[in-house]
Amino acid sequence: MLVHAHPDDETIGTGVTMAKYVAEGAEVTLVTCTLGEEGEILLDEFAHFAADKDDSLGDHRLTELGAAMAELGVVDWRLLGGPGRFRDSGMVGTASNDNPDCFWRTDLLVAATELVRVIREVRPQVVVTYDDFGGYGHPDHIQAHRVTHYAVMLAASATFNAELGSPWQVTKIYWTAFPKSVIRAGIEAMQEAGAEHRETENGESEFASMDPDDIPFACDDELVTTTIVAPQFLPAKMAALRAHGTQVDVSGGFFALADNIGAEAFGTEFYRLAMGPTPSTQPETDLFSGIST
């Protein structure tokens, strides 16, 4: 089971992993915490969906999410508490972040209880979410981390809300990770290839001065415990990214690295083991490693 904050987060960080385990016959459940109503819209024809206009972006992103899951083969995908139950919070300091209905402001027990319901229903052995910084500090990502860990604990408790189903103990929790070495290799490949890319305001290449140490979601390599190598599912991941058209431009920025570092690298996804049996060898190559069948 994967717990993500907004539509598109699942494909960016875990798309290959999801497609791989679906193909191998594992039951894969995606739980998305918000509809991403406050997202920046990249396509001019959908500008009227914005929160300060029609405020209908969430409905559209739900459609995009469904299309993306079809590309990855995931049939069990759901919104935490149902569509629109928790609203996208936006970043700290914005008006949307002060909205009492936003995910960031939601009582932790309220949100966790909704996730307990899902955990006890699908009974996952492995749960994937973000680290305690939410990858890059987005409030909804941080809240997804908190909600996930709290829900896993509550789901295992025999005394917590029997109406939500019988207790279930998750065996392993993973956090998504983007190793600095991989990001650095991609930046260098872009610079060496002289590939087409956008320029900054001063006319420099957007990759010219990029340093992995300055990228919030870049993870120190020694923290990575688990590597999923499945480049054969990269086409599915890229198709799923394209499905998130209002949010993702696969021709530039981070996604442009795919054409320069190759499918082997971009078709690999990385994780940190946060709970569960310590792997005998690192990195692990299977999220289910150490779990008896």
Image (cartoon, rainbow, N blue to C red):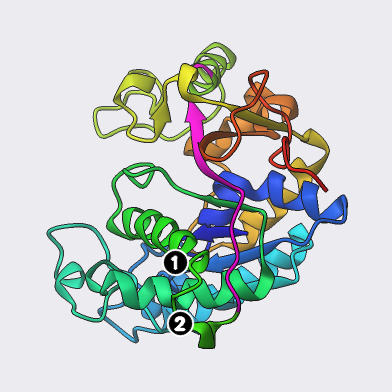
Instruction: Categorize mark 1 by other alpha carbons within 10 Å: few (<14), some (14-19), many (20+).
Output: many
- Residue at x 52%, y 88% (from the top left corner): 163
Q: Secondary structure at mark 2?
A: loop
Q: Position of residue 115 (x, y in %)?
A: 49, 72
- Residue 171 is covered by the magenta coloring: yes
The one nearer the camera, 133 or 53, is: 133
The one nearer the camera, 104 or 43, is: 104
Quadrant in the rendering for residue 243: bottom right
In the rendered image, the vertical position of residue 106 relative to residue 94, given as above or below: below
Q: Is residue 12 left or right of residue 204?
A: right
Q: Secondary structure at mark 1?
A: helix
Magenta range is 166-181
In the rendered image, the vertical position of residue 77 relative to residue 171, given as above or below: below
Which residue type carries mark 2?
A: Asn
Q: Which mark is residue 154?
A: 1
Which residue type carries mark 1?
A: Leu
Distance from disc 2 to disc 1, alpha carbons, whole Å, reads 9 Å
Residue 5 can be seen, yes or no? no
Q: Position of residue 257 (x, y in %)?
A: 57, 30
Q: Is residue 143 left or right of residue 238?
A: left
- Residue at x 32%, y 34% (from the top left corner): 216
Residue 69 can be seen, yes or no? yes
Q: Position of residue 78 (x, y in %)?
A: 59, 75
- Residue at x 59%, y 81% (from the top left corner): 165
The one nearer the camera, 92 or 44, is: 92
| Residue on which the image places disc 2 | 161
